[in-house]
Image (spheres, rainbow, N blue to C red):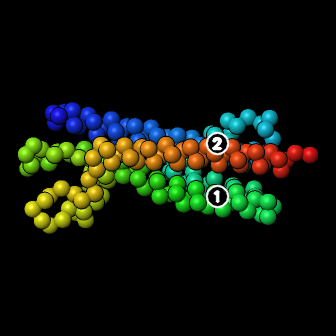
Amino acid sequence: MTEAKEFSLLYESVGRALSAWSMVEHHICDIFSAVIITDRNLAVGYAHSAFWAVESFHGKLNMVDASIKLRCRSDLENYEGLLLEWATIYKRAREKNNSRNELAHGTVMSFGNYAPPEIYFIPSFFRTLLRDVPFTMDRRPKNRLTAQQIDDRTRAFKEFSKRLLQFYLRLQKELEDDLSP
């Protein structure tokens, strides 16, 4: 494979991963809307606008977390399972966001001292450069990623997105049942 083709392969892998991550955020936005809108006839545009106005993912996630906890606090007995599931999702979302950030703030690099030159994606390159490059003859950062490893993250983001969608559908049903006369 040519060097240009290897670069393209890594860039395409990063693009797929970041696109998969966008669905994670989309489903978290849906969860937020389901929690704060008690009248299903009200346009969800207000909730979506508020969600997307928050710039950081942690800010968005914390906003959803606070909303779910407030909405469910009046009937903790009935919502205990839902809140436990959300606590797990919340923790996983924070962890997975670190993987996303590494991709969003990394770079593709060629290590030409090898024959043939090796090309890798280096997550959060400049932030971790001095810490992660060992003082040995091997100058490649130890946290380097191949296209396959990035594709593994894409699959993980897609699986997490499916879990979020399932949670959203469960949440929506339980909250609607709660509002039924």
Pick the front one: 31 or 159: 159
* Horizontal arrangement in the rendering, residue 166 relative to residue 159 (left or right): right
Q: How far from the left and from the top, in percent, is residue 146?
A: 27, 46
Q: CA distance from mark 2 to mark 1?
A: 16 Å
Answer above or below: position of 96 versus 80: above
Pick the front one: 174 or 39: 174
Q: Are marks 2 and 1 in contact (CB under 8 Å)?
A: no
- Mark 1 burial class by Cα count in 10 Å: few <14, some 14-19, many 20+: few
Q: Is residue 176 visible?
A: yes
Pick the front one: 64 or 153: 153
Res 108 → quadrant: top left
Q: To which residue does mark 2 refer?
A: 30
> In what quadrant of the picture does the N terminus appear?
top left
Res 17 → quadrant: top left
Q: Dot 1: what SS?
A: helix
Q: Dot 2: what SS?
A: helix
Q: Amino acid type of disc 1?
A: Glu
Residue 73 badge: none
Q: Is residue 52 visible?
A: no
Q: To which residue does mark 1 refer?
A: 85
Work out whether mark 2 precedes mark 1 in sequence or the reverse, and give the earlier one: 2
Q: Residue at x 78, y 49 (%)?
A: 175
Q: Amino acid type of disc 2?
A: Asp
Q: How far from the left and from the top, in percent, is residue 40?
A: 78, 38
Pick the front one: 29 or 6: 6
* Horizontal arrangement in the rendering, residue 173 relative to residue 133 (left or right): right
Answer above or below: position of 177 versus 127: above
Q: Residue at x 62, y 39 (%)?
A: 49
Q: Residue at x 80, y 35 (%)?
A: 41
